[in-house]
Amino acid sequence: MIDLTGKSAVVTGGSRGIGRAIVLRLAAQGADVCFSYQSNAAAAQAVVAEVEALGRRALAVQGDAAQPEAADALIKAALEAFGKVDILVNNAGITRDDLIMRMSIDAWRAVIDTNLSGAFYAIKAATRPMLKAKRGRIINITSVSGQAGQMGQANYSSAKAGLIGLTKATARELASRGITCNAVAPGFVLTELTVGLADQWKQKITEQTPLGRFGTPEEIADAVAFLASDEAAYITGQVLAVDGGLVMM
């Protein structure tokens, strides 16, 4: 059984979807959780209440993941509240889909800044306390789009592919100090972003997925909890696909 009792976790983008599921799963396994959200304070406070109902401490911090100051403030808040940061999960992400010839420069930059640079900022902010502790778990949420590419998502696919490179570089750089860094690559997951897809697209996706269905946020959270645990102590620099077999590499 995964036991995170006494651990302190930081999750970016934790108020809804996959991020919310990760926050709740880490708390259910015993961790106190500090998470960021961008704008929906009501949703964030609802997650805080759910964590507290599990008997753990929670803290919601408003901030824009694309800003380095937000990462510094998030890690500082976690250190002040819990005294340490054992686990960092980089989940915050946005989409601004369009074909390359029509994609605006602003749409390109917004996705790269949030999905890739945001993860770098959080890792940079968390590195010092983890180095002092000589231990830590960093988990980045990438995507099948970063492994195989996705039409109409040049910005998103590039950011998620970059996140895989960032994961491997971080793993090599921090391994000697007992810090691991891995990535989870979700396939198509039922969240607010996908629930509104047209039925024909949902059918096409399930037909392309060997297991024949969408994933759930909880299934992604299960993988994150494992990589955050002592059971994953000898795993680093890896990309764990949780995609129903969609991308086999």
Image (tube, rainbow, N blue to C red):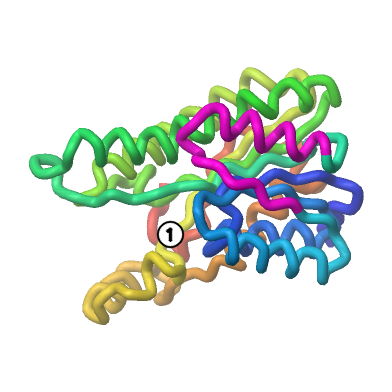
Q: Is residue 72 magenta?
A: yes
The relative height of residue 83 versus residue 62 in the rendered view (above or below) is above
Residue situated in front as seen by the camera: 34 or 123: 34
Expressed as whole percent of the image width and height from the top left, the position of residue 110 reads 33, 38
- Please name the amino acid that badge 1 sits on: Gly
Which quadrant does the N terminus fall into?
bottom right
* Viewer-proximal residue among 21 and 245: 21
Q: Is residue 60 visible?
A: yes
Quadrant position of residue 113: top left
Measured from the top left, where is residue 43 in percent x and y?
Answer: 58, 65
Residue 155 x/y as whole percent: 28, 40
What's the residue at 24%, 51% (across, down)?
97
Residue found 32% across the figure and 46% down from its top? 148
* Residue 201: x %, y % from top left: 25, 73
Q: Is residue 129 above or below residue 191?
A: above
Asked if one can make out residue 240 in the rendered structure from this viewpoint, the answer is: no
Q: Quadrant of residue 210?
A: bottom left
**Where does the magenta region start and end?**
59-80
Helix, strand or loop for disc 1: loop
* Residue lying at 35% horizontally and 49% vertically, measured from the top left: 145
Q: Residues within 10 Å of mark 1 (few under 14, many from 20)?
A: many
Near-viewer residue (10 or 49)? 49
Whether residue 216 is in magenta: the answer is no
**Residue at x 81%, y 52% (from the top left corner):** 32
Total label count?
Answer: 1
Q: Residue furthest right?
A: 6
Task: Classify residue 88 as left or right of residue 90.
Answer: right
- Answer left or right for 52 relative to 152: right
Point out the residue furthest to the bottom here: 199
Residue pointed to by mark 1: 187
Answer with left or right where residue 220 lies relative to residue 227: left
